[in-house]
Image (tube, rainbow, N blue to C red):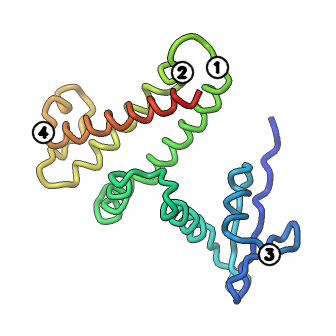
Amino acid sequence: MAQKQEPLLIKRYASRRLYNTETSDYVTLDDIAGFIRDGREVQIIDLKSGDDLTRQYLLQIVAEHESRGESVLPVDVLTDLVRSYTTQAHSVVPQFLAASFEMLRDGQSKMMENFGAMGNPMAQMPGFEAMQAQQEAFMKAMMSGFPGSTGSSDDDDDASDKTENGSRDELDAIKKQLAELQRKLSGLG
């Protein structure tokens, strides 16, 4: 197995300029986005205070891409993220997103390895059923904090039968979005 590479250290000076410690030159947000697309982990620290500013700058990169029309996150997802900051679902969102992206990365790499194999590549994506189950569990957990939801945390079939129409409609909408994503991914080949 390959040894994990150390993160690229970027220092932010008081002038807000960003300094690449590997190449000893100044970089922009676009440069940092390029490093990340190339597979590098990046850590951005404030030179004076030593504070880790990585999250702040990554969010800024995402916001700039979204504002330029390079939309990856549907409005519904952004709305749910904002909502999760004000509900009890906040505690499950980071783990769900991390696990979902990990599964997506694994699935994409396996799909590319198997591309050209028989049938629809999305149907053969490893972990696809697990990803669907995880999304359903996330929605159930998230909806339990909203008025009009059952609030049940049971995992048995009886609990899913008791789900109210509003939650079921939202789950159906998510399934529809997932199917659309599958269709788009299938079209990439």
The residue that disc 4 covers is 164
Q: Mark 4 or mark 3, which has the lower sequence index?
A: 3
For the point 49% across and 41% down, which residue is it? 100
Q: CA distance from mark 2 to mark 4?
A: 34 Å
Would you say the residues marked 2 and 1 are in contact, meaning their CB atoms lie under 8 Å apart? yes
Q: CA distance from mark 4 to mark 3?
A: 55 Å
For the point 44% across and 35% down, which residue is it? 181
Foreground tag (4 vs 3): 3
Q: Position of residue 170 (x, y in %)?
A: 23, 42
Q: CA distance from mark 2 to mark 3?
A: 42 Å
Farthest residue to the top: give it: 118
The residue that disc 3 covers is 26
Q: Mark 2 or mark 1, which has the lower sequence index?
A: 1
Q: Mark 1 or mark 4, which has the lower sequence index?
A: 1
Image-based side of 30 in relation to 179, left or right: right
Q: Secondary structure at mark 4?
A: loop
**Crowding at mark 1 (Cα within 10 Å: few <14, some 14-19, many 20+):** few
Q: Mark 2 or mark 3, which has the lower sequence index?
A: 3
Q: Amino acid at mark 4?
A: Glu
Q: Position of residue 101 (x, y in %)?
A: 53, 43
Numbered tag placed on residue 114 in the rendering: 1
The residue that disc 2 covers is 121
**Crowding at mark 3 (Cα within 10 Å: few <14, some 14-19, many 20+):** some
Q: Amino acid at mark 1?
A: Asn
Q: Mark 2 or mark 4, which has the lower sequence index?
A: 2
Q: Position of residue 164 (x, y in %)?
A: 12, 39
Foreground tag (1 vs 4): 1
Q: CA distance from mark 1 to mark 4?
A: 40 Å
Q: Position of residue 157 (x, y in %)?
A: 22, 25
**Crowding at mark 4 (Cα within 10 Å: few <14, some 14-19, many 20+):** few
